[in-house]
C-alpha cells in the first residue's frame, strides 16, 4: 500500500487540475465566440497531467527531463508553471503567443528552457523522437529521462513500436517513460472496434519492457504510479510503458463540436474525495474555481487587445541563423 500523500499536496493537485480545466473551458468559449479558430485539448487528462507536471525534473539540457507531449497536455505544462494567458494567446494566434508566435494550434507547446520539445499535430510521431533525446541522456549520465505522452489510437502506429524497439537494444537500453492515454477513442473511432485488448501496456511485453496500468482519473493513484515508473527509468536507465485510463470529456476537438460527453470527470471525482476526507469544503472548492475563472476572464481582456502577426513576421523564427544571428 503506497503512503498517503501530504494533505497540502492533495489540495495543490486540485488547484492545478482546476487551473487546467478552467483554461480548457475558456479556450472552448473563445472558439465559439470568434476569438479562436480551432480547439483541441485535454479535458479529462487533468488528474495524471497535474501529477506528471509536478514530478518532472524541470530544466534545460540533458541533465533534466525532456518532454515529448501530445496535444492534450495542458495540465502538464500548467502544473510545471506555465501561465494560462499564454494558452489563450496561442488560441487567438496573437504575435505574443510564446509557443509558436501565432502559427500553431492551441496546446502545441514549445518551451526550450524546460526541454519541452515542440508539439506537432501529426499523430504519435513524438514516440519515435523520444529515444533520440534519451540516447543523449544515456551518454550524458545522471537521472534525466525522456517522457513521451500519446493516445491509445496512436499506440497502434509503427512509431510506437519503433520507439520500443530503439529503447531496448541490448546493451543500449534508453531511459524513456512512455505514457499511453487510453480514453477509448481515436478521433471518432471507438477503441473497442479496432483494438483487440484494452490492456495496451501489455504490448510492451514483447520488447521485455516493464509496464503498468493506472486509473488516470485518480490523481493520487496516478502520482504513485508515476513515481514508481520514473524511479525505475531514472535509476535503471531502461524504458517503462504506463497506460493511463482516462476520459475525453469534450470530444476529439472543435471539429466534433467540443460538446460535453457523459464520462467520468476526474475533477468532480477528486472534489468529492477531498470533501469526504475532510481536506476541503464545498465553499473552499468553489473559491478555487472562482479564482481561476476570474483570472482567465481578465487574461482574455488582455489577449484580445494584443496584436496579430503581420507580414513582417512571416519569415521570423523560420531559419536557424546561428548563435550570432548571422
Image (cartoon, rainbow, N blue to C red):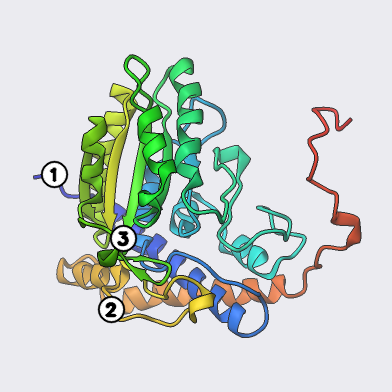
151, 190: nearer the viewer? 190
The N terminus: image quadrant: top left
254, 15: nearer the viewer? 254
Query: For the residues marked 2 and 1, what is the alpha-carbon distance in whole angstroms?
Result: 27 Å
Left-right relation of 299 to 103 = left
Q: Is mark 3 on a helix, strand or loop?
A: helix
Tag 1 or tag 2, which sits nearer the N-term?
A: 1
Question: Which of the numbered marks, if any, corresponds to residue 168?
Answer: none
Residue bearing the label numbered 2: 282
Residue 276: image location, x then y, percent: 15, 71
Q: Which residue is drawn at 46% across and 56% down?
A: 73
Vertical relation: 277 (above or below) 146: below
The reply to whether dot 3 and dot 2 touch (C-beta < 8 Å) is no
Tag 2 or tag 3, which sits nearer the N-term?
A: 3
Tag 1 or tag 3, which sits nearer the N-term?
A: 1
Q: How many labels does the image show?
A: 3
239, 292: nearer the viewer? 239
Question: Which of the numbered marks, if any, corresponds to residue 11?
Answer: 3
Q: Which residue is drawn at 21% across and 49% down?
A: 213
Vertical relation: 216 (above or below) 131: below
The reply to whether dot 2 and dot 1 touch (C-beta < 8 Å) is no
Question: Which of the numbered marks, if any, corresponds to residue 2?
Answer: 1
Left-right relation of 149 to 1 = right
Q: Residue at x 62, y 67 (%)?
A: 88
- Nearer to us of marks 2 and 1 is 1
> Would you call the spot at circle 1 few (<14 residues within 10 Å), some (14-19), or many (20 or more)?
few
Residue with the most extreme bottom position: 33
Locate residue 113: give its quadrant. top right
Amino acid at each position: 500500500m503506497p503512503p498517503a500523500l501530504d494533505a497540502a499536496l492533495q489540495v495543490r493537485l486540485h488547484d492545478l487540475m482546476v487551473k487546467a480545466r478552467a483554461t480548457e473551458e475558456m479556450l472552448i468559449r473563445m472558439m465559439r465566440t470568434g476569438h479562436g479558430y480551432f480547439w483541441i485539448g485535454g479535458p479529462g487528462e487533468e488528474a495524471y497531467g497535474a501529477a506528471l507536471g509536478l514530478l518532472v525534473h524541470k530544466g534545460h539540457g540533458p541533465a533534466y527531463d525532456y518532454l515529448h507531449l501530445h496535444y492534450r497536455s495542458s495540465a502538464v505544462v500548467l502544473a510545471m508553471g506555465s501561465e494560462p494567458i499564454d494558452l489563450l494567446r496561442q488560441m487567438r494566434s496573437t504575435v505574443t503567443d510564446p509557443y509558436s508566435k501565432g502559427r500553431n494550434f492551441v496546446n502545441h507547446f514549445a518551451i526550450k528552457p524546460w526541454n519541452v520539445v515542440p508539439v506537432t499535430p501529426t499523430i504519435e510521431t513524438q514516440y519515435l523522437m523520444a529515444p533520440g533525446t534519451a540516447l543523449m541522456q544515456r551518454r550524458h549520465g545522471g537521472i534525466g529521462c525522456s517522457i513521451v505522452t500519446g493516445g491509445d489510437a496512436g499506440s497502434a502506429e509503427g512509431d510506437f513500436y519503433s520507439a520500443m524497439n530503439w529503447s531496448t537494444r541490448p546493451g543500449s537500453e534508453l531511459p524513456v517513460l512512455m505514457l499511453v492515454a487510453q480514453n477509448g477513442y481515436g478521433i471518432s473511432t471507438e477503441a473497442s472496434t479496432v483494438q483487440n485488448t484494452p490492456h495496451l501496456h501489455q504490448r510492451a511485453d514483447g520488447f521485455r519492457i516493464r509496464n503498468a496500468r493506472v486509473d488516470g482519473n485518480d490523481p493520487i493513484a496516478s502520482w504513485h504510479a508515476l513515481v514508481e515508473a520514473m524511479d525505475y527509468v531514472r535509476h535503471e536507465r531502461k524504458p517503462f510503458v504506463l497506460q493511463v485510463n482516462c476520459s475525453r470529456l469534450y470530444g476529439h476537438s472543435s471539429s466534433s463540436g467540443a460538446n460535453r460527453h457523459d464520462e467520468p470527470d476526474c475533477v468532480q471525482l477528486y472534489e468529492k474525495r477531498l470533501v469526504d476526507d475532510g481536506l476541503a469544503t464545498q465553499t473552499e472548492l468553489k473559491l478555487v474555481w472562482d479564482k481561476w475563472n476570474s483570472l482567465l476572464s481578465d487574461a482574455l481582456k488582455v489577449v484580445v487587445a494584443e496584436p496579430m502577426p503581420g507580414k513582417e513576421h512571416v519569415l521570423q523564427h523560420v531559419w536557424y541563423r546561428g548563435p550570432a544571428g548571422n
